[in-house]
Structure formats: C-alpha cells, structure tokens
Image (cartoon, helix red, strand yellow):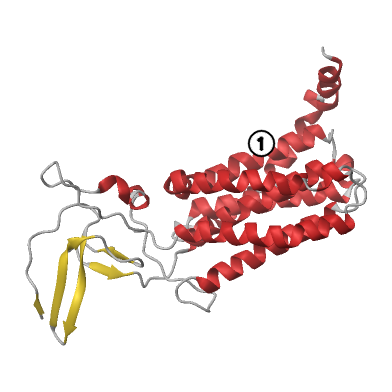
Amino acid sequence: KAVDIQPACLGLYCGKTLLFKNGSTEIYGECGVCPRGQRTNAQKYCQPCTESPELYDWLYLGFMAMLPLVLHWFFIEWYSGKKSSSALFQHITALFECSVAAVITLLVSDPVGVLYIRSCRVLMLSDWYTMLYNPSPDYVTTVHCTHEAVYPLYTIVFIYYAFCLVLMMLLRPLLVKKIACGLGKSDRFKSIYAALYFFPILTVLQAVGGGLLYYAFPYIILVLSLVTLAVYMSASEIENCYDLLVRKKRLIVLFSHWLLHAYGIISISRVGKLEQDLPLLALVPTPALFYLFTAKFTEPSRILSEGANGH
C-alpha cells in the first residue's frame, strides 16, 4: 500500500495522525500529539486504542475504586460511635454510591452505553507520564506530545471520583439527617466532611502517582491489609478464637481482610501465572492464625492497659 513519506517523528510519544485514507493510500499529518483514545505505535503512527483491558488493568481499577469506599467505611465507623444505629445504613449507602458511580463511569466511557471499555496496553512506567517526554529538537522549541498513552486508565479514575462525590452529596446528607438520631448535630456530618478532604487527596494521588500505584498496588494491598488486621485484632484485645467468634462484627472485619489478602495475591500473580499461583490463596488465613497462636506471648491487652496508664 502507498503511505505518505514524511520526516522521522521525534520524541517517545509523538506521532502522525491519519488525515485521509482511500483504499491503499494513507496520508498522515505532521508529527505531533495523538488524539484522545489513540497512542503511537512502533512506526510513530497514531493508532486507535481497540484492545480490551487485561485482568491486571481491571484489578488496578478495582483497587482505585475501593480506596474511597474503604475510607468512607473507616470514617463512618470512626464518627458513628458504638451505640449508633445509623452506621450500618451509612455503610450500605456508601457501597451503593460507589457501585452506582462505577457503573455510570463505565457507561459514559468509550464505547458509550455498555459496561465495557477499550484501552491501550500499558507497556512501561513512562506511559503514565508522557508530559515528561516532550522533545525539543533544537533545544529551544518544545513539541508538545502529551496525551493519555494508557487510555483510559488514567482519566477514568478521575471521572469515577467525580461521580462518587456527586452521589455522596445527593444521598448521604438526607440519609444522615433522617436516621442519625444517636449523634449530636456536630457529629452527624463528620464522615461527609472527611470525604470532602480525602477525595481531593485521592485525586492528587492519582494525578501524581498513578503510574507508580499501577505497579505497586498489589504490594500496597498486602502490606496495609496485614498491618490493619494486626492493629484491629490487638486494639479489640482478640487473643483466642473465642474472642473472635463472640461478635459478628469481628468476623466481618476478618473476612474482609481475607478478601483483600486474596485480591493482593491474585494481582501479584497476574493472568499469565494465575493457574500455578492459585494454591497461594490457601495462605490467606495464615496471618490471622499466626496472630492467634502468638498473641499469648505478647498479651496485647496488657500492652494496651499499660499504655493507657502512661507506663
């Protein structure tokens, strides 16, 4: 086929956009930024993103979607108090908000109207930071080729957070006002105020560290889930199986952490080695069992009581 011959394209992410195609004839424009939904190939031509996200990509998006939900649940529990009957309803509402936001985000993403997205394959860390790779051929003029090479994994998270925030502001204040009878007026909306702080923080985190999180999130999940489980069990003075079974809430927290352990293990395995790494899921209960077997040697209740007394 005949292809319009032009000078070589400089820069890692600069490409030539297809202007005209007639049969075997393709005419490309000047070297520059690729349109949204496209990225450069090895020949420096802008190609549409038509691939399906890999399992690892979906797991990354799931991790970014879980962050606001977990933070919602944490602050709801933190500010609700032990005797508040509104905590459960707020937990369910937060889950509903994040679930609906995720569905809407998928529906408005390309292709519009279906629970499916097309994407470009992530090849290396620099794909997340194309703004750092704009070439300067004469060391004076910069050719701006910044575009979303990992389309849509970078921007879809911002869209999801925006819908989460809008749905929270529409639903949560009404619910809290009606059912949070056990709390004072100043305490009722503190979990909502907390969300107004952590959503901007999550947005900045994705903007600056999205690429780093993409490669590190499986290890972040494993480390944080292990630490939070140990902290929760020690703070709740759980020293044997009976202490764990005496309250349903403790079992829910335990199983939630086990799900996070499994999520992290599957994310580390990736799809290529998933079958041979599935036996590793048998290790999910190990941290909790190790804690229960060794708690009698450390006596968390004694440490907590000494800390409260200032010794």
In the image: residue 84, left or right of residue 227: right
In the image: residue 247, left or right of residue 126: right
Question: From this viewpoint, which residue is outermost toward the front?
Answer: 185
Across and down, in percent, residue 21 comes to: 18, 82
- When the figure is inspected, residue 293 is found, relative to residue 114, above or below; the finding is above
Badge 1 element: helix
Q: Residue at x 16, y 69 (%)?
A: 29
- When the figure is inspected, residue 162 is found, relative to residue 51, above or below; the finding is above
In the image: residue 196, left or right of residue 273: right
- When the figure is inspected, residue 279 is found, relative to residue 286, above or below; the finding is below
In the image: residue 308, left or right of residue 285: right
Quarter of the picture containing the C terminus is: top right
Q: Give amino acid for label 1.
A: Val
Q: Kindly indicate the quadrant of the structure image that contains residue 223.
A: top right
Across and down, in percent, residue 162 comes to: 57, 58
Q: Residue at x 37, y 51 (%)?
A: 128
Quarter of the picture containing the N terminus is: bottom left
Q: Residue at x 52, y 72 (%)?
A: 108
Residue 132 in view in this figure: yes
Residue 292 in view in this figure: no
Give the labeled residue for mark 1.
227
